[in-house]
């Protein structure tokens, strides 16, 4: 996939320490990033409503391909016990339509091939 495209990044933040009397090591008045990830579109169904719509695509392992996609003005919300994203994608759905999709979370296991120094 070409570099430099539009990305939607979600960051999970811990609130700042708001206790002014807490002088413990690591106390901070700014948010701390607990984790972050880039949203990917899973190509399991047709995506878009015009001639440029993205068609479903399977991978060689039998799953579905994933790709970066434009999630303009993304907003997360909870519904029926799941996390959803509400966004626009002008090139594929028009600039007035809002789209919503559930978000699927997967645990990322660090690669055992990465080198580390002691």
Image: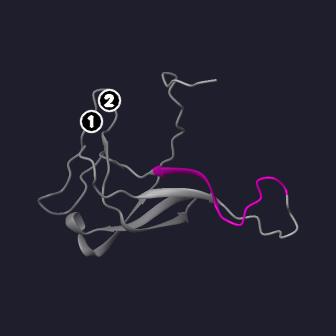
* Residue indicated by mark 1: 58
Query: What residue lies at 56% left-to-right and 61% top-to-bottom?
Result: 80
Residue found farthest to the right:
21
Is residue 93 shown left or right of residue 113?
Answer: left
Q: Is residue 72 above or below residue 36?
A: below
| Residue 54 colored in magenta in the image | no
Query: What residue lies at 27% left-to-right and 27% top-to-bottom?
Result: 60
Residue 70 % position (x, y): 31, 60
Q: Is residue 59 above or below residue 82?
A: above
Whether the residues at callouts 1 and 2 have beta carbons within 8 Å, the answer is yes
Provide the secondary structure element on which disc 2 rests.
loop
Residue 53 % position (x, y): 18, 56
State the residue in front, 64 or 114. 114
Image quarter of residue 21 = bottom right
Residue 15 % position (x, y): 69, 64
- Quarter of the image that includes the N terminus: top left
| Residue 26 colored in magenta in the image | yes
* Residue indicated by mark 2: 62
Residue 74 % position (x, y): 42, 67
Image quarter of residue 14 = bottom right
Count of numbered labels shown in the rendering = 2
Which region of the structure is painted magenta? 24-37
Q: Is residue 114 above or below residue 22?
A: above
Mark 1: few, some, or many residues within 10 Å (few <14, many ≥20)? Answer: few
User: Of the numbered discs in the image, which one, if any, rests on residue 88?
Assistant: none
Query: What residue lies at 22% left-to-right and 60% top-to-bottom?
Result: 48
- Quarter of the image that includes the C terminus: top right
Is residue 103 shown left or right of residue 40?
Answer: right
Q: Is residue 98 above or below residue 83?
A: below
Is residue 105 shown left or right of residue 96?
Answer: right
State the residue in front, 104 or 37. 37
Mark 2: few, some, or many residues within 10 Å (few <14, many ≥20)? Answer: few
């Amino acid at each position: 996939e070409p570099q430099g495209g539009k990305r939607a990044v979600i960051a999970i933040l811990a609130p700042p320490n708001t206790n002014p009397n807490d002088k413990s090591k690591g106390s901070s008045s700014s948010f701390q990033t607990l984790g972050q990830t880039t949203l990917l579109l899973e190509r399991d169904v047709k995506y878009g409503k015009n001639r440029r719509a993205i068609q479903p695509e399977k991978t060689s392992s039998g799953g579905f391909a994933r790709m970066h996609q434009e999630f303009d003005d993304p907003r997360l919300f909870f519904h029926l016990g799941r996390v959803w994203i509400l966004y626009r994608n002008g090139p594929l759905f028009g600039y007035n339509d809002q789209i919503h999709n559930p978000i699927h979370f997967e645990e990322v296991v660090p690669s055992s091939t990465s080198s580390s120094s002691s």
